[in-house]
Amino acid sequence: MLLVDQFGESQGFFAGMPLFFKLFGGFVVLAIAGTIIFVIVKGVGTWSSNNASPVVQARCKVIDKRTEVWGGSGDSSASTNYYITFEFEDGNRVELPIRSNQFGLIAQGDQGELTYQGTRFKGFNRTIM
């Protein structure tokens, strides 16, 4: 609700605020909204691309495993992303994100059949030698 005093001056929240602060505040709100929209659009694009990709099954070898830890400053907890690099028989490699409960079940040097769709890990069946 906008209040007007006896001289016709507005008495709202932004009335006495300098123009710089109004513009800076608007910029911050637009930057946050733009970042949220960008993340949503990027996520939907990746999801759509993965769904459009064929499901691939191929023999491969586990070349490397890595983790990416982020966050954890102050009172916030850390988060970890897990990745495994697979090398196919033709020498091509692919690194896929993997869930933590499956990361520990696959060891570097394992050989077997990888199933994946785009950048989405579907499964790995180890070949016992």
Image (spheres, rainbow, N blue to C red):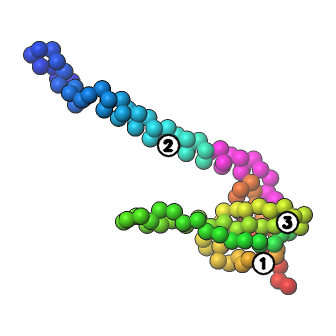
Quarter of the image for the C terminus: give it.
bottom right
Q: Is residue 102 magenta?
A: no
Q: Who is closer to the viewer here, 116 or 6? A: 6
**Horizontal side of residue 122 vs 18, given as left or right:** right
Q: What secondary structure is marked by label 3?
A: strand
Residue 12 visible in the snapshot: no
Q: Residue at x 45, y 38 (%)?
A: 31
Q: Which residue is mark 3?
A: 88
Mark 1 vs mark 2, CA separation in Å:
40 Å
* Residue 84 rendering spot, x and y as whole percentages: 70, 68
Q: Which residue is mark 1?
A: 109
Q: In the rendered structure, which disc, 1 or 2, sits on the residue that comes first in sequence?
A: 2
What are the residue bounds of the magenta stretch? 44-56
Q: Tell me if residue 72 comes above or below residue 41 in the rendering.
A: below
Mark 3 vs mark 1, CA separation in Å:
12 Å
Residue type pointed to by label 1: Gly
Q: Residue at x 31, y 32 (%)?
A: 21
Quarter of the image for the N terminus: give it.
top left
* Residue 3 rendering spot, x and y as whole percentages: 17, 23
Q: Who is closer to the viewer here, 76 or 74? A: 74
Q: What secondary structure is marked by label 2?
A: helix
Residue type pointed to by label 3: Phe
**Picture disc at residue 65:** none
Q: Is residue 53 magenta?
A: yes
Q: Tell me if residue 45 comes above or below residue 81 in the rendering.
A: above
